[in-house]
Image (cartoon, helix red, strand yellow):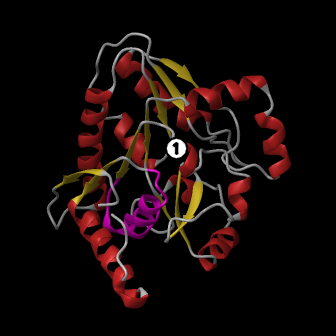
Amino acid sequence: MYNVRVTIVPTPQATTELRRLEKVASVAGAMISEALEDGMTLGIAWGTTVSAISERLVPKPLERVTIVQLNGAANPVTTGIPYVGELLGNFGRAFGAKILAFPVPAFFDYASTRAAMWRERSIAAVRDAGRGADIAVFGVGAFSAPVASHVYAGGYMSGEEVLRLRRDGVVGDVCTVLVRANGSYADIEINSRASGPTPAELARIPRRICVAAGPAKATALAGVLRSGAVTDLIVDDECARRVIEENERRWHARPGHAGIAE
């Protein structure tokens, strides 16, 4: 589906959303540990899902591994350092890796400020490391989910901003880049101020592992898959089922039932 390798994690129907996340994160933690090798760079995008993964990594002694933060975490009320620092530290300790933090806002107030920051050599070095990563790991942000996406629950956006985005067809985000249900993102204003890599930039990384848990993530996940950001998907069975249903609805809604490329 969507030209990605899919790992489906079975979960009991009666399970809680938190338990569902824990099961998916455990599978992701093991897969990341297996995939990472000496000399590699691993790019990670902070969030609720990646935080859960960081607590379930299988330790693996490696040499010359670098962990790089892909998107900024500061907002008007916090630097984001305690939250992201713990997450990065978990990855670093699991693999004996060097850490490259990215000390910028999740969203700049002005696109011109972002452009100026991108010219700074210290910031450019972190961005270059992230975009040259061998593997990227990220979750999917959704506007409403029982286990809240950190970017929407942590003060990064106002309620008015979220309302405007939803009116524009936005369903969620990947690496704090907002996407619509059809996978488009380039003309969404806030993305001109976002610090994370776009799906097109992610697509230059050889392996991009997306992890999603819970049926409430399905619509956002489908949009992220359509954006081309993902090579590997780790997802629970209920969310996977909802994504398939979403795909079928869009297929039947097209004139002449033209198929969606998978």
Q: Is residue 46 visible?
A: no
Q: Please give the residue where the numbered disc 1 appears in the rendered image.
A: 202
> What kind of element bears circle 1?
helix
- In the image, taking residue 132 as reference, residue 77 lies left or right, namely right
Image x and y of residue 133, in percent: 49, 29
- Above or below for 66 versus 158: above
Q: Which residue is drawn at 34% across and 25% down?
A: 36
Circle 1: is it few (<14), some (14-19), or many (20+) Cα within 10 Å?
many
Quarter of the rendering containing residue 60: top left
Q: Can residue 220 be seen in this view?
A: yes
Image x and y of residue 37, in percent: 33, 20
Image x and y of residue 134, in percent: 44, 29
Q: Which residue is drawn at 49% across and 59% down?
A: 227
Q: Look at the image and say whether residue 183 sits in the magenta stretch.
A: no
Q: Which residue is drawn at 52% across and 64% down?
A: 172
Q: Which quarter of the figure is the C terminus placed in?
A: bottom left
Residue closest to the eye, 132 or 99: 132
- In the image, taking residue 132 as reference, residue 15 lies left or right, namely left
What's the residue type where badge 1 is placed? Answer: Leu
Q: Magenta span covers which residues? A: 212-229
